[in-house]
Image (tube, grey):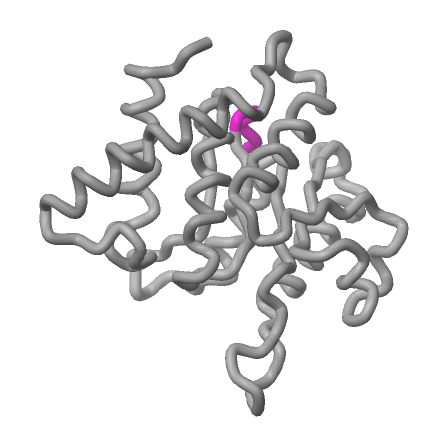
Amino acid sequence: MMDTKNVFINCPFDNEFYPLLKGIFFVLIYLGFKPKIAETSDSGQVRILKIKDLMVASPLSIHDLSRIDPLATDAAARLNMAFEMGIDFGLRYSGIPEYGTKRFLILEKEEHRYKTFLSDISGNDIKSHQNDPELIIKAIRDWIKSQGQRKAVPRHKLIFSAFNEFLMYYNQMIGGEGYDPKEITALTFSDVIDIMTNWVKKFKKI
């Protein structure tokens, strides 16, 4: 069953993308939403089924295609993100009324680059973030504003300023505990989300 505050996140899991992922988590939490991202702790659970369950429970989805490139020169392209987005599109156009209301934000690092590998989405409004956390925060903030679900949505500069304040706190806290704040596997995503949620509750400015 869908929760109107759930937002499914489909993105790569690597250290290069991690600053952007923290920005995605933060802006959603700051605006009162619940980030939902696949983090399977049950070895008996098939990952794709976990992903499907998160999609089914989320009326909003963010799909980032900016890391479809191979990790190395001779490696194959990374297609997981495009594959997961296709499943979500399938739900939306399945004819099941509940899923027909799903809304997507598709992100890329460069404007129009996606046309070279996924031309079928050329008619969609794709947002470029240029690997910049501020731009990804702005894209998500503006998208949430366009949904009309929140009466008052702070401008992105305020959210980005709060994000930078949080990062100073976060880096100092987990660094002091012996973790590397730049390492995506240092903490679970649920740990990071909990830390952000508690910080926002205490220090949110609007």
Image position, residue 41 (x, y; %): 29, 56
The percent position of residue 165, horizontal first and vertical second, equals: 34, 28
- Is residue 56 in the magenta section? no
Outermost residue toward the bottom in this view = 74
- Residue at image position (49%, 48%) is 20
| Quarter assignment of residue 44 | bottom left
Give the position of the N terminus as an image quadrant.
top right
**Residue extending furthest toward the left:** 177
Magenta residues, dominant SS class: loop
Relative vertical location of residue 124 with respect to residue 6 in this rendering, above or below: below
Q: Name which residue lies at 46% across and 9% down.
A: 206
- Write the start and end of the magenta stretch as one range: 1-5
Q: x, y (%) of residue 83? A: 65, 65
Q: In the image, residue 140 lies at what x, y percent?
A: 61, 34
Residue 202 position by quadrant: top left
- Front residue of 80/28: it is 28
Instruction: Tell me what residue is drawn at x 55 percent, y 38 percent.
Output: 134
* In the image, farthest residue toward the right: 123
> Left or right: 94 with respect to 164?
right
* Position above or below: 128 against 202: below
Q: Does residue 78 lie above or below 57 as drawn?
A: below
